[in-house]
Amino acid sequence: MSIPLRWRLLDLETGATLTECVDVDGLFTDRVFPVEPVYERYTLLNCAPSGPLVAAINGTGPTWFGNFAVEGAHVPGRPLSRAFG
């Protein structure tokens, strides 16, 4: 049985899908820092990259994406464990 993909990263300017994944490690952890970090690192688990992310991974595109904005989206009435699409 495959695990449903629950997260989709989109390009904010074009709306293109960068990747879909099962989970994002580190996204929902409460961390206490002495000072705010310059950047935070997240790990995309069971990732299915596409578009610009594939190009970055295989070396044919830019390796720097800039800043990512993370916004939650949930379709009311749809169970959280159901795959999107």
Image (spheres, helix red, strand yellow):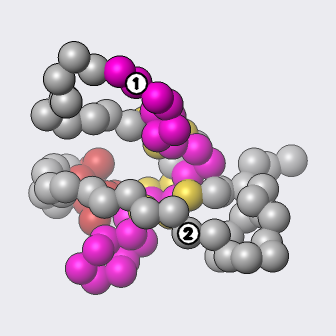
Given residues 66 and 36, the one toward you in this image is 36
Marker disc for residue 73: 2
- Residue 84 in the magenta stretch? The answer is no
Q: Residue at x 16, y 50 (%)?
A: 63
Q: Residue at x 19, y 29 (%)?
A: 37
Marker disc for residue 84: none
The answer to whether 41 is drawn above or below residue 21 in the figure is: above
Residues at badges 2 and 1 in contact (C-beta under 8 Å)? no
The answer to whether 47 is drawn above or below residue 82 in the figure is: above
Q: Residue at x 63, y 69 (%)?
A: 74
Residue type of the residue flagged with mark 1: Arg
Magenta extent? 10-32
Residue lying furthest bottom in this view? 14
Q: CA distance from mark 2 to mark 1?
A: 23 Å
Which residue is the site of mark 1? 31
Under circle 1, the secondary element is loop
Residue lying furthest right in this view? 1
Q: Residues within 10 Å of mark 2 (few under 14, many from 20)?
A: few
Q: Is residue 39 left or right of residue 51?
A: left
Q: Is residue 53 left or right of residue 36?
A: right
x, y percent for residue 44: 47, 42
Q: Main secondary structure of the magenta part?
A: loop
